Image (cartoon, helix red, strand yellow):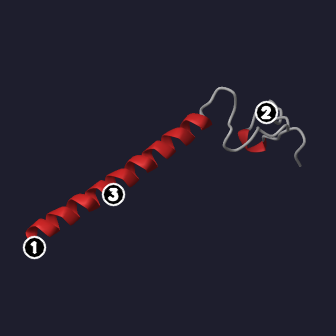
Amino acid sequence: MSAGAVFLLVVVLIVVAALGGGLYALIAWLRHKQLDPEGDEIEGPPEEQPRPEHVAVENEQRTRFAGTR
């Protein structure tokens, strides 16, 4: 009886290790694609909208950006 339990425990450990290794490899591959210098291939190209220009102000509570209300 104990030999069967040890065998099942070893099989379960091998399966868990294989799933963990596969998940680690998948995450590492996706992270590598995301940090690729050619651009972010996971989420697509960045939007082409220009960033708003900052306006010099004296009071930070009254800060406005060009193109906003």
Report, in whole angstroms, how far the alpha carbon at label 1 lies from the one at label 2. Answer: 79 Å
**On screen, 19 above or below 8?**
above
Q: Is residue 41 left or right of residue 64?
A: left
Q: Secondary structure at mark 1?
A: loop
Q: Which residue is at the front of the view, 5 or 32?
A: 5
Mark 3 vs mark 2: which is more N-terminal? Answer: 3
Examine the image and state in which quarter residue 24 appears. top left
* Whole-percent x, y for residue 58 in the image: 76, 33
Q: Is residue 59 left or right of residue 37?
A: right
Report, in whole angstroms, how far the alpha carbon at label 1 lies from the one at label 3. Answer: 22 Å
Amino acid type of the residue that numbered disc 1 sits on in the rendered structure? Met
* Whole-percent x, y for residue 4 in the image: 15, 68
Label 2 crowd bin: few (<14), some (14–19), many (20+), radius 10 Å: few
Label 3 crowd bin: few (<14), some (14–19), many (20+), radius 10 Å: few
Q: Which residue sits at x=80%, y=30%?
A: 56
Q: Which residue sits at x=59%, y=32%?
A: 35
Amino acid type of the residue that numbered disc 2 sits on in the rendered structure? Val
Q: Which residue is at the front of the view, 64 or 38?
A: 38
Q: Is residue 52 left or right of residue 23?
A: right
Amino acid type of the residue that numbered disc 3 sits on in the rendered structure? Val
* Whole-percent x, y for residue 47 in the image: 81, 40
Examine the image and state in which quarter residue 6 appears. bottom left
Q: Which residue sits at x=74%, y=42%?
A: 44
Label 1 crowd bin: few (<14), some (14–19), many (20+), radius 10 Å: few
Numbered label attached to residue 15: 3
**Which residue lies under the disc numbered 2?**
57
Numbered label attached to residue 1: 1
